[in-house]
Image (spheres, coloured by chain):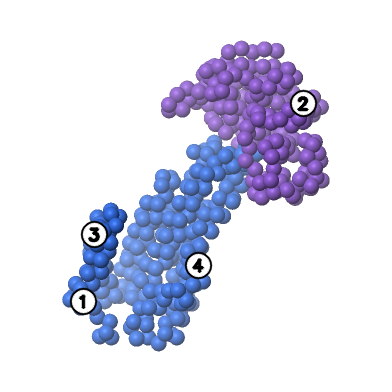
Amino acid sequence: MLFQLDHVGFKTPERAILTDISFTVEEGEYVTFSGPSGSGKSTLLRLIATLLTPTSGTITYRDQPQGSYAKVAYRRQVSYCFQQPSLFGDTVRDNLAFPFSLRDRPFDPTQAMQALAEVDLPESMLDKPITELSGGEKQRVALIRNLLFTPDVLLLDEVTTGLDSATKEIVHRLIESKNQHDGLTVLAVTHDEGEIAVAHRLITITGGRMEAEHE
Amino acid sequence: MNNLIVSPTALAFAVVLVIIALLVNFKEHIGMEKDLITGVLRAVIQLTVVGYVLTYIIKVDRAPLTLLMVAVIILNAAWNARGRANGIPHAYAISLLAISAATVTTIALLVLAHAVKFTPSQIVPISGMIASNAMVAIGLCYRNLNATFHDQRQAVLERLALGADAKQATAEIVRAAIKTGMAPTIDSAKTVGLVSLPGMMSGLIFAGIDPTKAIMYQIMVTFMLLAATSLASVIACYRAYPQFFNADLQLR
């Protein structure tokens, strides 16, 4: 078992955002989360990513409590991709070089260009200023920033929302391929029917509680 | 040296200058009359007390007393810098460390180089100059850190999500804050003599010292302040940025 969430809850001083969430995820699964906006789906992914800590319940990862992992190492294995990512520095290169610099490794332009090609972006994109990128291009650069060093788990927070259908297709194709061929576990918050259809499981969250689970 | 003495009557006439500032305040409805009067009263009281204290310390010329005065200056400077931290945890301890390190290192180097003598008449004013400049630099660093952590919250979160540690996630923010802290001293070093004749140099010229000799001191002060603000900014920023994270490496 890869993840086990046991009665997980999260509340702020003002209100409870998630209550009594329990489910398990197996290695290589593609799980989608759906539900009305404000129902706590993004919070759930952030809890799994350790960007937030549950206020009740427990999350275990590979049979160890999530809290027992060093945060930096865990987040490199369980990689969270934001809905509206912000890119760093000046150019696409600055963004793709970041995962290398985190690991004290020299930037490999060939690897970066291969990654760009996987999301239908040209090699010339590498030196393009980030201010000149469209929304779809930014989202794709952000996604491959997460995937340059393939993690074990990819957490996607509505990454295709607002993208045109062609870009959505490119992103879905990459994620599906990583899931099917590389065994990447994918947990995705989405409203996209196409993405829900290819996933193994759909968990619906309403008002901070798990409402239904469909195979 | 008689031309240096400002008589109480002359000082009383100088109050006219304060009245001008007050009139401008009233006329333009700026609303800082209370601050202005408080500022003037505090300046008069603080400087009078310090004048007498310094006279005593210089007269007795004892190292422990000189060091005590330096400590009082540093403690006060740290307290004021903390006031600009706007909620950064442990800001007083961080400010105290940064200002102490900057002051002690700079003065130690100056004394070792025989640029100044370890006498109260030299050590106390120089400590004041270093501590106040370090205090301002640290205050700017804190303000910049707070503003940038607020504006770039999303970017920091993304770096953390990619597996960055606190240092990697904030390297650019910390660099920018250090730059902000050092900028005024570097700018004033660029314009010294052209735009302003700084306090040390002006004081010596007032006292009748040859300006070519006065500049030697001012050059030393410029170097000293560059070192002090650099040290203070670096120490304060590197100690302050981890305070923006909790034990789970999440943004507070």
B12 vs A197, left or right, is left
Contact (CB < 8 A) between labels 2 and 1?
A: no
- The residue labelled by disc 3 is B37
State which chain disc 1 sits on: B
Query: Which residue lies under the disc numbered 1?
Result: B10
Residue A108 located left or right of residue B96 = right
**Crowd tier of the residue under label 3, counting other residues whose Cα lies within 10 Å: few below 14, some 14–19, many 20 or above:** some
Q: Which mark is residue B191?
A: none
Name the residue located 51 percent from the left edge and 67 percent from the top edge. B186
Which quadrant of the view contains residue B195? bottom left
Q: Residue at x 74, y 50 (%)?
A: A127
Q: Residue at x 74, y 32 (%)?
A: A167
Check disc 4 and report the residue beneath it. B187
Q: Are marks 4 and 2 in contact (CB under 8 Å)?
A: no
Q: Position of residue B48 (x, y in %)?
A: 23, 68
Secondary structure of residue under mark 3:
helix
Three-letter residue code for mark 4: Asp
Amino acid type, label 1 = Ala
Query: Chain A's colour?
Result: purple
Residue at the far front: name it.
B27
Q: Colour of chain B?
A: blue
Measured from the top left, where is residue B65 in percent x and y? 30, 68
Q: Nearer the viewer, mark 2 or mark 1?
A: 1
**Circle 2: residue type:** Glu
Q: Is residue A71 above or below residue A14?
A: below
Residue beneath disc 2:
A176
